[in-house]
């Protein structure tokens, strides 16, 4: 068997078709050498999680190109500091790589702290740093001692795994900030930590408002619109809710292990998931009056938005969608959201989904639906066209592919500027799907969704 044939054969472990091929997706693995992959690197995963910490200096120890992955590809908003909107780099050159970049890193940390008076610095390692062996931990420890602040190394050399490894590296960095507290006092509070929410287009604020109406206080958001001080106080919560399990499942487990804070998974994407999540939070916090307030909120909002959603459902009947996103939780929520507006998902895949998430996906979709992990562009094209999809929901890398194929495209990634969470987010989603799929532009394309 040739190397090319072996690689193609191995790719089959990442693809399943419900009802035709056993659904045992080989997920959360490194990308296959020699095959085109969509999976992002470790540094990318770490930066996604940590960048919304608004009052931190985010310093990339590596070539200047890596620092291009910064705040402006995200829609994360801040209610305070705007420091996170800057991206700093040590800009390692040939001589730095030959002789080492530790002195340069120490000098730049000193310069940045003096200029911005920050109390927190995240220093990200990149592939080059992993190769040349700079002692990031030692440099950060010395800088923290000199300035009396927290300088946290983020071990995110890109080649050591995949995006999920970057999530874990970010969670390890966050854990170094959390201060222990009296657990008996924290357990009696009605405060929660919201994990896996990055405040895209202000979504954390929307959910905070719902919870406040129920009488539940949000203690810390990991990491949307968060600060050094709010993260340090994370152990004061009595419950953790986890939205993006791919990025925060590890952190939730460690917070339970270290501080005794239980956690539950939630989703605020779509009407059904939003309502169910509010109910489960109220129940976990003791029920009673909280549950009554939750039901009142849900009833009021459902009565308001249901007629609008119904109108879009009638207009979108018969349309088919393909989904290719980062995490499994998002894919699961999108399947449900499309069901709410009358659209069948005929292909679904993720870059960092876990096996249990794929099991849930398999239970939700119809027979014949293609389920895949870490697909490359050729595979996406093959299955989207073969399944007759009219629409692709994906990230920035998939947009050109969709348009070249004459497919409608919706950006569900981190650079969007409109909220999709909560009840108003469900309206925004339905409106965007309708205006995109039903645009008159498609009558001028060569093909659209196989029609």
Image (cartoon, helix red, strand yellow):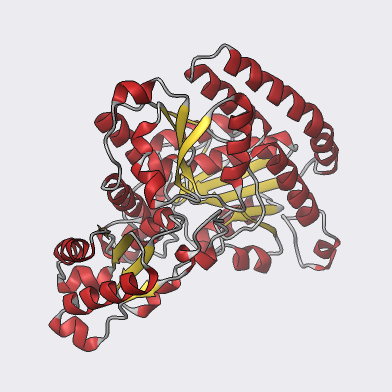
Where is 351 relative to 257, above or below?
below
Whole-percent x, y for residue 227 in the image: 42, 51
Q: Residue at x 41, y 33 (%)?
A: 356
Whole-percent x, y for residue 353 in the image: 43, 44
Where is 289 relative to 312, above or below?
above
Q: Residue at x 33, y 66 (%)?
A: 34
Left or right, residue 146 beside residue 291? left
Residue closer to the observer: 109 or 6: 109
Quadrant of the image for the C terminus?
Answer: bottom right
| Image quadrant in which you'd find residue 414 | bottom right
Residue closer to the observer: 305 or 451: 305
**What is the total number of numbered labels drawn onto the structure image?**
0
Whole-percent x, y for residue 413 in the image: 56, 55
Left or right, residue 263 beside residue 180? right
Quadrant of the image for the N terminus?
Answer: bottom left
Where is 143 relative to 107, above or below?
above
Q: Residue at x 85, y 43 (%)?
A: 315
Residue closer to the observer: 287 or 366: 287
Q: Residue at x 46, y 31 (%)?
A: 192
Does the image show residue 22?
no
Does the image show residue 307?
yes
């Amino acid at each position: 068997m040739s190397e090319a044939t072996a690689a193609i054969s191995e790719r089959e472990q990442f693809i399943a078709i419900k009802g035709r091929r056993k659904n045992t997706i080989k997920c959360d693995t490194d990308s296959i050498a020699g095959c085109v992959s969509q999976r992002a690197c470790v540094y990318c995963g770490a930066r996604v999680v940590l960048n919304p910490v608004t009052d931190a200096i985010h310093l990339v120890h590596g070539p200047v190109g890596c620092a291009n992955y910064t705040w402006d590809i995200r829609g994360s908003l801040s209610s305070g500091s705007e420091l996170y909107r800057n991206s700093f780099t040590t800009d390692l050159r040939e001589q730095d790589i030959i002789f080492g970049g530790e002195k340069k890193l120490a000098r730049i940390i000193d310069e940045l702290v003096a200029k911005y008076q920050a109390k927190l610095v995240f220093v990200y390692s990149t592939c080059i740093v992993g190769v040349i062996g700079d002692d990031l931990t030692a440099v950060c420890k010395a800088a923290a001692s000199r300035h009396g602040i927290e300088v946290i190394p983020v071990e995110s050399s890109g080649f050591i795994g995949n995006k999920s490894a970057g999530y874990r590296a970010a969670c390890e960095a966050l854990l170094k900030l959390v201060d222990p507290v009296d657990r008996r006092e924290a357990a009696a509070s009605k405060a929660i930590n919201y994990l896996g929410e990055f405040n895209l287009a202000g979504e954390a604020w929307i959910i905070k408002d719902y919870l406040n109406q129920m009488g539940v206080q949000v203690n810390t958001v990991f990491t949307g619109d968060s600060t050094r001080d709010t993260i340090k106080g994370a152990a004061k919560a009595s419950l953790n809710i986890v939205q993006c399990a791919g990025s925060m499942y590890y952190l939730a487990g460690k917070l339970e292990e270290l501080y005794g804070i239980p956690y539950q998974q939630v989703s605020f994407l779509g009407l059904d998931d939003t309502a169910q999540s509010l109910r489960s939070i109220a129940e976990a916090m003791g029920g009673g009056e909280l549950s009554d307030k939750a039901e009142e909120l849900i009833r009021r909002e459902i009565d308001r938005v249901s007629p609008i959603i119904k109108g879009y459902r009638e207009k979108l009947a018969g349309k088919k969608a393909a989904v290719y996103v980062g995490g499994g939780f998002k894919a699961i929520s999108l399947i449900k959201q499309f069901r709410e507006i009358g659209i069948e998902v005929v292909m679904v895949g993720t870059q960092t989904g876990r096996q249990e998430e794929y099991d849930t996906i398999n239970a939700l979709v119809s027979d014949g639906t293609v389920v895949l992990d870490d697909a490359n562009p050729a595979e996406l094209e093959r299955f989207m066209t073969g399944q007759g999809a009219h629409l692709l929901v994906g990230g920035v890398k998939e947009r050109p592919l969709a348009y070249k194929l004459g497919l409608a495209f919706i950006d569900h990634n981190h650079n969007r500027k409109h909220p999709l969470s909560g009840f108003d987010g469900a309206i925004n989603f339905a409106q965007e799907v309708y205006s995109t799929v039903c645009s008159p532009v498609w009558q001028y394309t060569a093909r659209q969704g196989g029609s």
